[in-house]
Image (tube, rainbow, N blue to C red):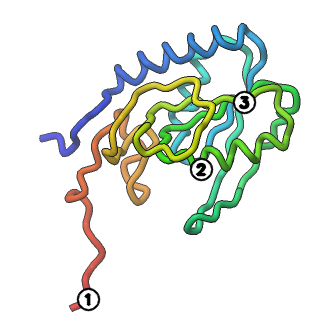
């Protein structure tokens, strides 16, 4: 018995990522592009999307740490993005706050343009406007795992996206 409720299987993901690659190529008309994603959740999506884009591209990754509502960059990009098109690659956009933080940081590096490509997007939870130009799938508030997304560092390597079944995970031990 499969312990997961699969929302998007591997074949569906790869088909949609291929379509996103074609959309991105049409948008940038073979101009060089820099893909920037956040560790760790976007890793699988970044890898597959970068292969689906025919245009010449570079990629880099950042890491963001959040403490409550305060965010800070713990790993910055090393690729020069000045006067280049930048596409922020996100596995999921919910509130948009972390993505906005990254966009503000990248804006200081003077890119030619910036846009966002999200594999998953929940517009009902979004709190801030973003240049969200490419979306793989629209989802609801369901928490998801797999394809880079985790729950307490578990299930990132699943080749599909599944609904998070909270009862599968052991809760913190209660003191007697």
In space, the residues marked 3 and 2 are separated at their CA atoms by 15 Å
- Compare marks 3 and 2 and give the one earlier in the sequence: 2
Taking the spot 68% from the left edge, 36% from the top edge, the residue there is 36
Q: Is residue 58 above or below residue 173?
A: above
Q: Which of the labelled discs sits on residue 175, or is there none?
A: 1
Taking the spot 41% from the left edge, 16% from the top edge, the residue there is 15
- Compare marks 1 and 2 and give the one earlier in the sequence: 2
Q: Nearer the viewer, mark 3 or mark 1?
A: 3
Taking the spot 86% from the left edge, 35% from the top edge, the residue there is 110
In the rendered image, which quarter contains the N terminus?
Answer: top left
Image marks 1 and 2: residues in contact by CB distance under 8 Å: no
Residue 127 or residue 79, whichever sits in front: 127
x, y percentage for residue 82? 87, 32
x, y percentage for residue 164? 29, 49
Q: Which of the labelled discs sits on residue 98, or is there none?
A: 2
x, y percentage for residue 148? 46, 42
Q: Nearer the viewer, mark 1 or mark 2?
A: 2
Taking the spot 79% from the left edge, 40% from the top edge, the residue there is 107
Left or right of 134 in this view: 154: left
In space, the residues marked 3 and 1 are separated at their CA atoms by 50 Å
Image marks 3 and 2: residues in contact by CB distance under 8 Å: no
Residue under label 3: 114
């Amino acid at each position: 018995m499969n312990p997961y409720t699969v929302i998007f299987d591997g074949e569906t993901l790869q088909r949609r990522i291929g379509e996103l690659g074609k959309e991105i190529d049409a948008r940038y008309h073979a101009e060089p592009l820099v893909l920037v994603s956040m560790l760790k959740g976007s890793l699988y999506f970044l890898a597959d999307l970068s292969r689906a884009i025919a245009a010449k591209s570079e990629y880099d990754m950042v890491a963001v740490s959040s403490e409550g509502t305060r965010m800070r960059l713990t790993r910055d990009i090393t690729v020069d993005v000045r006067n280049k098109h930048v596409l922020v690659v996100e596995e999921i956009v919910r509130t948009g706050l972390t993505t906005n933080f990254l966009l503000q940081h990248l804006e200081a590096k003077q890119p030619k343009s910036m846009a966002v490509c999200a594999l998953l997007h929940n517009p009902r939870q979004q709190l801030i406007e973003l240049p969200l130009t490419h979306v793989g799938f629209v989802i609801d508030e369901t928490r998801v795992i797999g394809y880079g997304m985790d729950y307490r560092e578990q299930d990132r390597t699943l080749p599909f996206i599944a609904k998070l079944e909270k009862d599968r995970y052991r809760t913190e031990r209660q003191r007697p």
